[in-house]
């Protein structure tokens, strides 16, 4: 719940940062937000939407980030006549948002996976040299085990994300030696592999690897 609250707070902050001072930004429920751009025509609305999208895509590289990755799907509608009610405008914007969400789904998963990998490397302090060594190890193991190219790719990805559950641990536990942990800390620590499995199982790109 705390992680979800933090994600919503960060999303709200990005929305506020990329809108005009006179714009109205509000959470309408769950993970959905409504923005009212007073006096904005379709062209200005698209400009603001593009600005918001760019800021969300750049979020994972921000030094002041408070979560690992944010994505957003936007839909908009412009009132051009008095006959258009707020309900009709909301319905139009909602339909466009769902269409874009469906189109973006695969790319968002790939970006999220890349963000998680980057966070893992940062937490483990993996240098470019260490990454090259990992690739070399995968190549040698693949040759020894007579793995197909597809299996080698799966092995490489497994080695990269096998510790994804560690990101859910408190910072104080991530790199703490096991023999220095208290009994309570150790119980928290050993659950990270189960958490990692659930995370990896949720993405089509890594589900098969998790099952294997």
Image: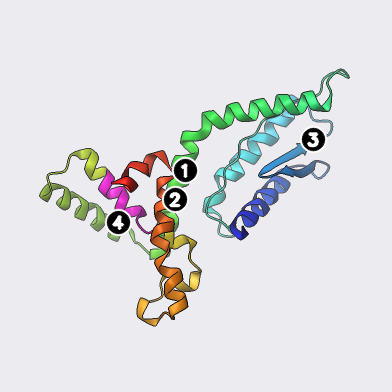
Q: Which residue is mark 4?
A: 131
Q: Which residue is mark 2?
A: 199
Q: Secondary structure at mark 3?
A: loop
Marks 3 and 1, the one that precedes in the sequence? 3
Task: Give how far across and how far down residue 40 sits, in percent.
Answer: 79, 30
Q: Which mark is residue 111?
A: 1
Residue 176 counted in the magenta span: no
Asked if the residue under mark 3 is in contact with the one under mark 4, i.e. CB atoms within 8 Å, the reply is no
SS type, badge 4: helix
Tell me the residue at 47%/43% (across/down): 111
Q: Which residue is at 16% across, 43% downward?
A: 147
Circles 2 and 1 in contact, beta carbons < 8 Å: no
- Looking at the picture, how far across and down is residue 130, in whole percent? 29, 60
Real-space Cα separation, disc 3 to disc 2, in angstroms: 37 Å
Q: Secondary structure at mark 1?
A: helix
Whichever of callouts 1 and 4 sits on the residue coming sooner in the sequence is 1
Q: Nearer the viewer, mark 4 or mark 2?
A: 2
Please check the rendered image and state whether residue 158 is part of the magenta-colored stretch, yes or no: yes
Which of the marked residues, 3 or 2, is nearer the chain's N terminus? 3
Q: CA distance from mark 2 to mark 1?
A: 15 Å
Label 2 environment density (alpha carbons within 10 Å; few <14, some 14–19, many ≥20): some
Per the image, label 2 sits on a secondary structure element best described as helix
Counting from the top left corner in percent of width and height, residue 112 is at 48, 46
Q: Earlier in the sequence, mark 2 or mark 1?
A: 1
Which stretch is magenta? Answer: 154-163
């Amino acid at each position: 719940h705390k992680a979800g609250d933090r994600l919503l707070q960060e999303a709200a902050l990005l929305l506020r940062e990329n809108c005009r001072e006179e714009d109205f930004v509000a959470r309408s429920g769950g993970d959905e937000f409504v923005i009212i751009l007073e006096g904005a025509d379709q062209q200005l609305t698209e400009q603001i939407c593009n600005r918001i999208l760019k800021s969300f895509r750049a979020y994972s590289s921000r030094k002041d980030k408070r979560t690992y990755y944010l994505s957003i799907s936007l839909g908009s509608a412009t009132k051009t006549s008095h006959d258009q009610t707020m309900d009709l405008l909301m319905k139009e914007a909602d339909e466009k948002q769902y269409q874009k969400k469906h189109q973006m789904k695969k790319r968002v998963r790939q970006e999220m996976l890349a963000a998680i990998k980057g966070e893992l490397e940062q937490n483990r302090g993996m240098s470019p040299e260490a990454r090259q060594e990992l690739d070399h190890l995968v190549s040698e193991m693949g040759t020894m085990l007579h793995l197909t190219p597809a299996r080698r790719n799966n092995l490489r990805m497994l080695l990269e994300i096998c510790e994804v559950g560690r990101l859910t641990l408190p910072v104080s536990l991530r790199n703490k030696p096991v023999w220095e942990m208290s009994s309570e800390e150790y119980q928290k620590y050993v659950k990270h592999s189960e958490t990692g499995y659930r995370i990896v199982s949720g993405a089509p790109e890594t589900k098969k690897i998790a099952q294997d």
